[in-house]
């Protein structure tokens, strides 16, 4: 069984699914089985149920921890939307002193076939969206989304909806793309009024 709760660089992360509609060229899961103190982040056969996630949370020693709990593992958290929502609500009750964040590809609306930004923003303190490129053609070439040309516009719409909710919102890109592309992503983020974080590529 894969680790559901793991730590990395002083933060607590939740790995709730291996499903993802993208196959990003730079995805860290292409390079190994785990991150941080996890033994493996690969589930065998199926994603965990809420009961399994809750069990690992209950068994984890959160004493003294008041930092972020981040939904981010070897998959897109909103692919396991029901488990994500139930887990977030449970954490709000169990650990109200901790902040909750989701690192997402922004494709939740397409994955779940309905608008999801409002519900996600009501549960999260921070939403970090992987923008990755500045237009559909570039995004498809880098991230290979199963939704094709629908993907990038859906990400921008999801971001607009999150911004309207007033949540702490940020875009991210990874520095595997050119400086020109990063600058174009920055211009798009500035136009939308959303901060952009440029992440360093990590191969391990």
Image: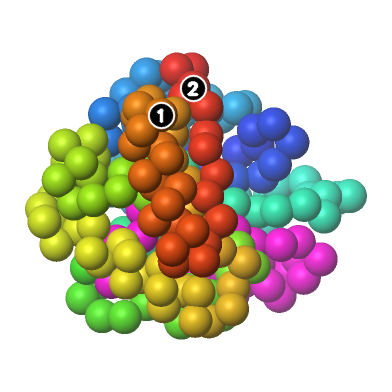
- Disc 1/disc 2 C-alpha distance (Å): 18 Å
Q: Label 2 belongs to which residue?
A: 202
- Alpha-carbon neighbours of circle 2 within 10 Å: few (<14), some, or many (≥20)? few
Residue 97: say if magenta: yes
Q: Is residue 13 above or below residue 176?
A: below
Residue 105: say if magenta: yes
Residue under the point 52% across and 62% down: 194
As rendered, which of 184 and 108 lies closer to the eye? 184
The mark found on residue 83 in the picture is: none
Task: Determine whether the residue tagged by mark 2 lies in a helix, strand or loop.
Answer: loop
- Alpha-carbon neighbours of circle 1 within 10 Å: few (<14), some, or many (≥20)? few
Query: In the rendered picture of this protein, how many numbered marks are placed on residues?
Result: 2
* Quadrant where the image shows the N terminus: top left
Res. 93 in view: yes
x, y (%) of residue 168? 62, 66
As rendered, which of 59 and 66 lies closer to the eye? 66
x, y (%) of residue 9? 69, 31
Q: Label 1 belongs to which residue?
A: 179
| In the displayed structure image, the side of residue 66 where residue 138 appears, left or right | left
Q: Is residue 102 above or below residue 38?
A: below
| In the displayed structure image, the side of residue 35 where residue 27 appears, left or right | left
- Residue bounds of the magenta highlight: 82-109
Snapshot quadrant of residue 189: bottom left
| In the displayed structure image, the side of residue 102 where residue 58 appears, left or right | right
Q: Earlier in the sequence, mark 1 or mark 2?
A: 1
As rendered, which of 141 and 29 lies closer to the eye? 141
| In the displayed structure image, the side of residue 58 where residue 122 appears, left or right | left
Residue under the point 49% across and 22% down: 202
As rendered, which of 141 and 103 lies closer to the eye? 141
Task: Determine whether the residue tagged by mark 1 lies in a helix, strand or loop.
Answer: helix
x, y (%) of residue 82? 39, 71
x, y (%) of residue 13? 59, 45
């Amino acid at each position: 069984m894969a680790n559901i709760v793991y730590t990395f660089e002083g933060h607590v992360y939740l790995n709730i699914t291996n499903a993802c509609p993208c196959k990003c060229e730079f995805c860290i899961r292409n390079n190994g089985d785990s991150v941080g103190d996890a033994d493996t982040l690969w589930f065998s056969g199926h994603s965990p149920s809420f009961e399994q996630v809750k069990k690992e949370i209950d068994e984890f020693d959160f004493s003294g921890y008041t930092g972020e709990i981040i939904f981010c593992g070897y998959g897109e958290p909103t692919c396991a939307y029901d488990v994500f929502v139930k887990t977030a609500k449970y954490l709000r009750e169990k650990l109200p002193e901790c902040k909750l964040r989701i690192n997402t590809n922004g494709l939740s609306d397409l994955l779940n076939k309905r608008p999801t930004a409002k519900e996600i923003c009501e549960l999260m303190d921070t939403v970090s969206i992987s923008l990755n490129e500045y237009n559909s053609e570039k995004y498809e070439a880098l991230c290979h989304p199963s939704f094709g040309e629908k993907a990038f516009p859906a990400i921008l719409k999801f971001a607009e909806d999150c911004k309207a909710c007033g949540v702490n919102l940020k875009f991210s890109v990874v520095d595997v793309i050119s400086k020109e592309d990063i600058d174009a992503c920055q211009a798009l983020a500035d136009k939308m009024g959303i901060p952009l974080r440029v992440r360093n590529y990590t191969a391990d």
